[in-house]
Amino acid sequence: MSKDYKKAVRNLEALLVNDSHMSVDDISRELADDGVDVKAFLARFDTVVRKGVQHQMRKQAEQEQQEAKSSLKQIFGDLRTKSREELRDLFEKVRQGLFGDHLKQAALARCCNFTGGEVSETELRSWLEDIAAVSEK
């Protein structure tokens, strides 16, 4: 097979554009007459397309895996969508040890400098994110 793949592709394109009325056998014969090893060319083309499709599928699977991991990372679910009340209830459950002693200790450590008063929604969310990070270890 000719190593000049670009020339072979150009010849194939020209042939397909100009002679679309021809049968597959006629096209194969004409390409062979022009010095193209049609079987080798199609085998190489098949390999390139297959590898390209496999690469794209692998890339998509990796992306979906990454998204699944990031959504599963949060033991408490998606904290961004929870209301202030839900965050406060969740934090209280952690403090009571309902999610295990190690998370209770993490909550105590995370909030050891808290002096009381009203806690903002953002602060609650941050505390829970930090505690969730402890559960991943």
Image (tube, rainbow, N blue to C red):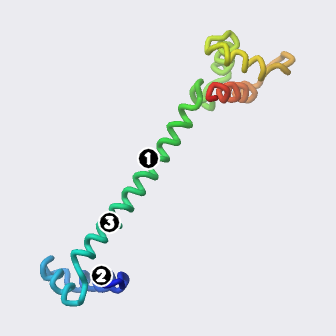
Q: Which of marks 2 and 1 is nearer the N terminus?
A: 2
Kindly identify which residue carries mark 1.
61
Q: Residue 71 carries which label?
A: none
Tell me what residue is drawn at x 54 percent, y 34 percent: 71
On the image, the x and y values in percent for residue 59 come to: 46, 52
On the image, the x and y values in percent for residue 1 come to: 28, 82
Relative side of 111 to 35, left or right: right
Instruction: Give the distance between the C-alpha atoms of the residues marked 1 and 3, in whole angstroms.
Output: 21 Å
Specify few, some or many for label 2: CA neighbours under 10 Å numbering under 14, 14-19, or 20 or more: few
Q: Nearer the viewer, residue 122 or 50?
A: 50
Kindly identify which residue carries mark 2.
13
Kindly identify which residue carries mark 3.
47
Q: Which of marks 1 and 3 is nearer the N terminus?
A: 3
Tell me what residue is drawn at x 44 percent, y 46 percent: 61
Tell me what residue is drawn at x 72 percent, y 20 percent: 106
**125 vs 112: above or below:** below
**32 vs 83: above or below:** below
Instruction: Give the distance between the C-alpha atoms of the residues marked 3 and 2, in whole angstroms.
Output: 19 Å
Q: Is mark 1 on a helix, strand or loop?
A: helix
Q: Nearer the viewer, mark 1 or mark 3?
A: 3
Q: Is mark 2 on a helix, strand or loop?
A: helix
Q: Quadrant of residue 118?
A: top right
Q: In which quarter of the image is residue 91?
A: top right
Amino acid identity at mark 1: Ala
On the image, the x and y values in percent for residue 25 come to: 12, 78
Amino acid identity at mark 2: Glu
Instruction: Give the distance between the C-alpha atoms of the residues marked 2 and 1, in whole angstroms.
Output: 33 Å
Q: In which quarter of the image is the C terminus?
A: top right
Amino acid identity at mark 3: Thr
Q: Earlier in the sequence, mark 3 or mark 2?
A: 2
Q: Is mark 3 on a helix, strand or loop?
A: helix
Specify few, some or many for label 1: CA neighbours under 10 Å numbering under 14, 14-19, or 20 or more: few
